[in-house]
Image: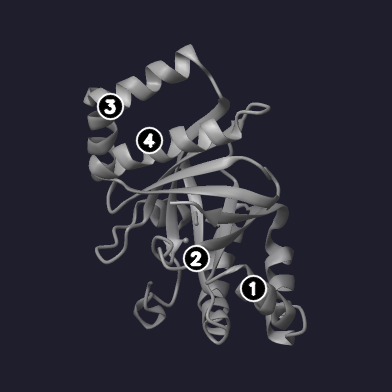
Amino acid sequence: LTILSFFNINCAKRLPKQPAYDTLLIQKREDIMSYVAIREVTPASGKEAGLQERMLRLSGVMTRLGAKSGLFKVVAGDGAGRFDLQNWYETVEAGATAFQAFGEDEEFQQIMQLRAADPVGEVVGPWIGRMIFGGAPKGNKPVRVHRDYQASRSAVQKAMELAPELQKLMETIGVDVGVGVPIMKDDHEMLRVVYQFDSMVHWGQSVDKMVSDERFIGLVNAAHEAATLKSSRMLVQIS
C-alpha cells in the first residue's frame, strides 16, 4: 500500500473499541504524516539505469513541490526489480495541492514529455493509501518489508487489535511497524503491514529472532485466521 508502509500512535490513547472501517479511513491524526501516493514502475529491458535516474529527478521535483518523497527498489519478493516512488502527506488537501502543483511545474512537464518520447518503464499508479496504525515510515530505516493481506472490514478491525502488541514486540529488536489500507486503488480489500529495518543485516537478524519467538508466531497465526496473506516484498531506499 507500507507495508503503506502503507503504516507513531500512542496505544494508550486509543479507544477501547475500534471505530468502523470507513471511520478509520477518514480519522484525522494531527501528529502523523499518514497519507501516501505510490507509483510502481517496472523498467523496460536494459533501461533500469535510465529509469532510476529519471525517477530520482522526479522525486526531487515532487519534494520541492511539497511531498515527502522517496524512491525505493524492490529487491526481493513480489514485484522484484521494479521501483516504488512514495509521496507522503499529512492531509489529503496537502496531497491534492502538491498534485495540482506537479501539473503546473515546468520541470515536471519536461520529465513527462521525456517519458512520452522515450518510455523506459511501465507505470502503475499513483494509488493512494492511508496509515491506520503508525505514521509515515522513518527515513533512517532504509530497508522495508511489505506483507499484503486480503482483508474484510472485520479483519481490518482485528488487525487494529493486534497492532499494538506487534509494535511492542518489534520494538524489542529495533523494528518499526505500521499498518495501512488503500483509499483509492483497484483493490480495496488489501491491508498492508510494513516492517522497517536499519539495514539488510538488521532484517536478517530480526527474522532469525522472529521465526523462533512464540509470541510473534502467535500474532502471525491470529492474523492469518482473520485475513489471507497474498504477497510480500522487500524494498531498499535509493533516495
Residue 63, which numbered label? none
Report how far apart the C-alphas of labels 2 and 1 lie in the structure: 21 Å
Look at the picture and state if 130 lies above or below 160. above
Instruction: Give the left or right position of residue 10, taking residue 162 as reference.
Output: left
Q: Nearer the viewer, mark 3 or mark 2?
A: 3
Element at label 3: helix
Q: Quadrant of residue 114?
A: top left
Can residue 186 be seen here?
no
Q: Residue at x 68, y 67 (%)?
A: 223
Residue 107, which numbered label? 3
Element at label 4: helix
Report how far apart the C-alphas of labels 1 and 3 lie in the structure: 38 Å
How far from the left and from the top, in percent, is residue 104?
A: 22, 24
Disc 3: CA contacts within 10 A as few (<14), some (14-19) or many (>=20): some
User: What type is the residue that disc 3 sits on?
Assistant: Glu
For label 2, the residue is: 178
For label 1, the residue is: 201
Q: Residue at x 74, y 79 (%)?
A: 208
Report how far apart the C-alphas of labels 3 and 4 lie in the structure: 9 Å
Q: Quadrant of residue 106?
A: top left
For label 4, the residue is: 58
Q: Residue at x 40, y 63 (%)?
A: 139
How far from the left and from the top, in percent, is residue 160?
A: 52, 68
Disc 1: CA contacts within 10 A as few (<14), some (14-19) or many (>=20): few
* Upstream in sequence: badge 3 or badge 4: 4
Element at label 2: strand
Element at label 1: helix
Instruction: Give the left or right position of residue 136, taking residue 164 as reference.
Output: left
* Upstream in sequence: badge 2 or badge 1: 2
